[in-house]
Image (tube, helix red, strand yellow):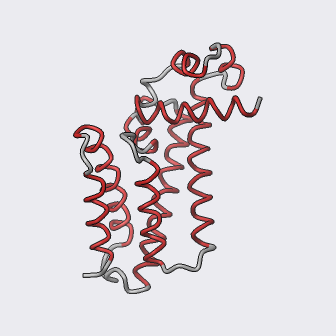
Amino acid sequence: MENRKKQIVDLAIKLVQQKGYVGFSYDDISKQLGVTKASIHYHFEKKEDLGVAITERIITSLQNFLLSIKNSSVSGGDKLKRFIQQQAERFACTEICPISSLQTDFNSLPEIVQKKIEEVSRLELSIMTELVAEAQTEDILNDTDDVQSVAVTILSSIKGALLYRRVLDDDILTGVINQINLILRKS
């Protein structure tokens, strides 16, 4: 039972990445999983319930990553590079970030899902800001740089590259990550 619920959320995340939240339906899920729509409704009565489950899965993933890097003995710069690399590797094919996809659909989302995507957005930004601040204290970044602006710039660059890659089918992401790494070597 719990396995089916996980399968539904896993597939829903992929569909969000491919079609956006408003672009997929329970019919898409039922056809791909080979189950009835009633089976999906059993686990997630309304699509907004599934939207909440999607965001909760993303939050858990971000929190697990944060715990893993906080417990590691690598430098702040290496933690930052690891987070950037992990973000890139998670979307190795032509998928976009599910957070970005949900942010794009934000005004069309039910209020409860809007609140959850706001929560996940704040968490992702706080993780990146924390990593940038740690890199700055280790003298990897200029201490005059606004930490949150640098964090937003890095996140926006990665997510923008994912969108360009989707449209142009080009390896733009690798170039963007290389440029970020050059910046992190300190100017």
Whole-percent x, y for residue 81 in the image = 42, 69
Work out which quarter of the rendered image holds the N terminus and state it. Answer: top right
Depicted 82 relative to depicted 121: above or below: below
Looking at the rendering, which quadrant does residue 88 occupy? bottom left
Residue closest to the eye, 168 or 96 = 168
The residue sitting at 25% across, 37% down in the picture is 167
The residue sitting at 26% across, 66% down in the picture is 179
Depicted 18 relative to depicted 29: above or below: below
Whole-percent x, y for residue 82 in the image = 46, 66
Looking at the rendering, which quadrant does residue 177 occupy? bottom left
Is 10 left or right of 175, judged from the image as shown? Answer: right
| Total marks placed | 0
Looking at the rendering, which quadrant does residue 57 occupy? top right
Is 167 left or right of 109, judged from the image as shown? Answer: left
Work out which quarter of the rendered image holds the C terminus and state it. Answer: bottom left
Depicted 123 relative to depicted 42: above or below: below
Whole-percent x, y for residue 64 in the image = 62, 58
The residue sitting at 27% across, 73% down in the picture is 182
Residue furthest out toward the right: 1
Depicted 18 relative to depicted 186: above or below: above
Whole-percent x, y for residue 63 in the image = 60, 58
